[in-house]
Amino acid sequence: MSERTVLHVKGRILVGPDDVRDELWVVGGRISYERPVGARDIRTVAGWALPGLVDAHCHVGLGAHGPVGDDVAEKQALTDREAGTLLIRDAGSPSDTRWVDDRDDLPKIIRAGRHIARTRRYIRGYAHEIEPEDLVAYVAQEARRGDGWVKLVGDWIDRDLGDLAPTWPREAVEAGIAEAHRLGARVTAHCFAESSLRDLVEAGIDCVEHATGLTDDLIPLFAERGVAIVPTLVNIATFPALADGGQSKYPRWSDHMRRLYDRRYDTVRAAHDAGIPVFVGTDAGGTLPHGLVAAEVAELVTAGIPAVEALAASTWSARTWLGRPGLEEGAAADLVVYETDPRADVRVLAAPRRIVLNGRVVG
């Protein structure tokens, strides 16, 4: 497509779950709902159009052993794009991916800086590993480095205990979260287990990743405080294999991981039913492949979340939560077109018909 080409998207434009229009136009990379006067070079795309999908827990620039080169990061971002993911909240990466911002053919990224973990309490090569007295300083550093988010590691295996345990004392997370908020950043935390959640929520955390440790007594607290969760169910599916690998050395941890896995769908459904905001994230990067957004939406449906709400968790609601536009007048034309109505069957998300990024058909 040349810069003069006008893109005409027609069929069913899902501006919102109940706001369906017949067509939109893309002029100069921007969305318009009025036919441009005098347009001659028009390309037409037909089908069911959604805002570009959101992966709210993804790691571009992260590999199994830490940071990767720009060439690998580019392949990761392109894989996500081909799956229809056009907006990523990068939930922690040791790589500097600012160069992606200069590429109009790659997904837009909202960064959380680098993970902040306790010394020897996370995957080697991923995080800043520090002690509690340094948490405020590192939170300030990553708040300035990121795009309005900071990522803490809230729990991890304690080798002396042989099980998952909180990584930070209550006073440290209170001070760290307060500093992030003072600097205008929101805070999220990796949490598998139950024990770290109350302190984090009462300290003012904005979001919890994975949240497999949510229990009946904690769910009302999350709902009252409006704390979102990103369950990453495609990642939680790896828990049984992880548990098997650690059985001989850490049997208590292994048994705990299996229990968290066994109740994963009940946990997510109970959170949703209580009004806790739930968003789609794959945890791609590290050991998980990119491009899994459709599988994660399908997992939310399997957990019992209605299809339209699971779809919203990766489109309309997710973009509102992250402060980014959808299919609005004048917004950058980031959209995905499908053969059939994704509200009727979310499995169609796995087969994008056309992908439009910054007004250009890229897939």
Image (tube, grey):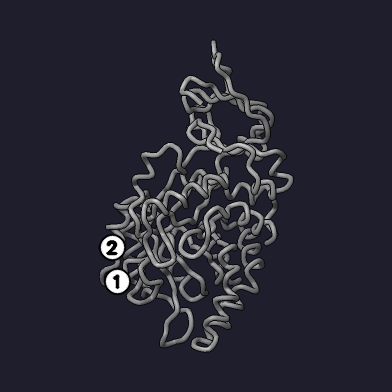
Q: Position of residue 145 (x, y in %)?
A: 30, 52
Q: Secondary structure at mark 2?
A: helix
Toward the top, the furthest residue is: 38
Q: Is residue 159 above or below residue 204?
A: below
Residue closest to the eye, 205 or 213: 213
Image mark count: 2
- Res. 93 image quadrant: bottom left
Position of the C terminus by quadrant? top right
Image position of 332 with respect to 131: above or below: above
The image's mark for residue 130 is: 1
The residue at 54%/33% (across/down) is 361
Q: Is residue 346 left or right of residue 361?
A: right
Using the image as rendered, state which of residue 197 and residue 152 is in the foreground. 152
Is 350 situated left or right of 82 in this image?
right
Distance from label 1 to label 2 (Cα)?
A: 9 Å
- Looking at marks 1 and 2 on the same chain, the residue that comes earlier in the sequence is marked by 1
**Looking at the picture, how far across and down is residue 222, in whole percent?**
53, 63
Give whichever of 129, 166 is nearer the camera: 129
The image quadrant of residue 90 is bottom left
- The residue drawn where x is 44% and y is 66% is 64
Q: Residue furthest right?
A: 344
- How crowded pointer 1 is (Cα within 10 Å; few <14, some 14-19, many 20+) is rated as some
**Amino acid type, residue under disc 1 in the picture:** Ile
> Which mark is on residue 138?
2
What type is the residue that disc 2 sits on?
A: Tyr
- The local crowd at label 2, few if under 14, some if 14 to 19, many if 20 or more residues have their Cα within 10 Å, is many
The structure residue drawn at horizontal position 65% and vertical position 27%, both measured from the top left corner, is 10
Secondary structure beneath dot 1 equals: strand
Eyeballing the image, is 129 above or below 18? Answer: below
* Vertical placement of residue 241 versus 81, above or below: below
Question: Looking at the picture, how far across and down is residue 39, in whole percent?
Answer: 54, 14
Do the CB atoms of the residues marked 1 and 2 lie less than 8 Å apart?
A: yes
